[in-house]
């Protein structure tokens, strides 16, 4: 019984790694660069440094998304709402357009359709990153339903 669980774990890890490598080659790297550029721009001003930190956090997720999930932070309050509004104006809608353009390019081939769907699932997180956490899917709290999982 333990051997079959270990085999499933190994297969799941292998599939996630393969999906992440395909994702990286067919759009993930360019999305990563977009988030890094937004993070650098946000860090130029002291007031928007928290936006830059969120952008770098999202950059890591856009680079290697499979095997991780996005969950709500239950303690997020009005500050997260205000930060999401500023984020949307400064960088969110540009990054959302990047996700849409990448999804359209990925959907041209049959192999790219699942990647395009995954790309579109990243839209809500790219527009409103505050009040959310990125966690490994293996570390999801019991009973916690992810907002987004790849």
Image (cartoon, helix red, strand yellow):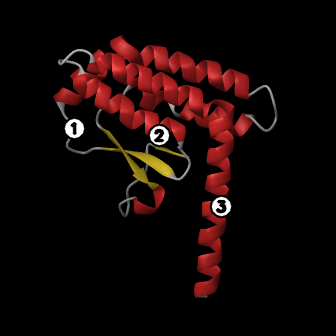
Label disc, if present, on residue 61 of the rendered structure: 2
> How packed is label 1: few (under 14 Cα within 10 Å), some, or many (20 or more)?
few
> How packed is label 3: few (under 14 Cα within 10 Å), some, or many (20 or more)?
few
Q: Quadrant of residue 100?
A: top right
Q: Spatial distance from mark 1 to mark 3, Cα to Cα?
A: 35 Å
Q: Nearer the viewer, mark 1 or mark 3?
A: 3
Residue 23 percent coordinates (x, y): 64, 39
First in residue order: circle 2 vs circle 3: 3
> Which residue was labeled with disc 3?
14
Q: Spatial distance from mark 2 to mark 3, Cα to Cα?
A: 18 Å
First in residue order: circle 1 vs circle 2: 2
Q: Circle 3 sits in a helix, a strand or a loop, which is it?
A: helix
Residue 144 percent coordinates (x, y): 38, 56
First in residue order: circle 1 vs circle 3: 3
Q: Is residue 126 visible?
A: yes
Q: Is 5 or 37 nearer to us in this picture? A: 37
Residue 101 percent coordinates (x, y): 63, 18
Q: Quadrant of residue 48?
A: top left
Q: Is residue 141 left or right of residue 78?
A: right
> Which residue shows up at 44% across the image and 26% down it?
35
> Which residue shows up at 60% across the image and 37% down it?
118
Q: Quadrant of the N terminus?
A: bottom right
> Which residue shows up at 58% across the image and 86% down it?
2
> Which residue was labeled with disc 1?
76
2 and 3 marks in contact (CB < 8 Å): no
Q: Circle 1 sits in a helix, a strand or a loop, which is it?
A: loop
Q: Residue furthest top?
A: 89
């Amino acid at each position: 019984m333990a051997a079959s669980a270990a085999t499933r774990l190994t297969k799941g890890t292998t599939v996630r790694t393969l999906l992440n490598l395909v994702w990286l080659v067919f759009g993930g790297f360019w999305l990563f660069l977009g988030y890094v550029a937004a993070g650098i721009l946000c860090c130029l001003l002291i007031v928007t440094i928290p936006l830059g930190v969120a952008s770098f956090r999202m950059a890591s997720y856009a680079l290697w998304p499979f095997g991780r999930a996005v969950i709500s932070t239950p303690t997020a309050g009005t500050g997260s709402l205000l930060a999401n509004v500023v984020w949307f104006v400064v960088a969110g809608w540009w990054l959302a357009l990047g996700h849409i353009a990448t999804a359209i390019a990925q959907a041209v081939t049959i192999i790219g359709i699942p990647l395009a769907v995954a790309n579109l699932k990243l839209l809500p997180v790219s527009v409103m990153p505050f009040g959310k956490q990125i966690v490994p899917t293996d570390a999801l709290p019991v009973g916690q339903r992810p907002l987004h999982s790849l």
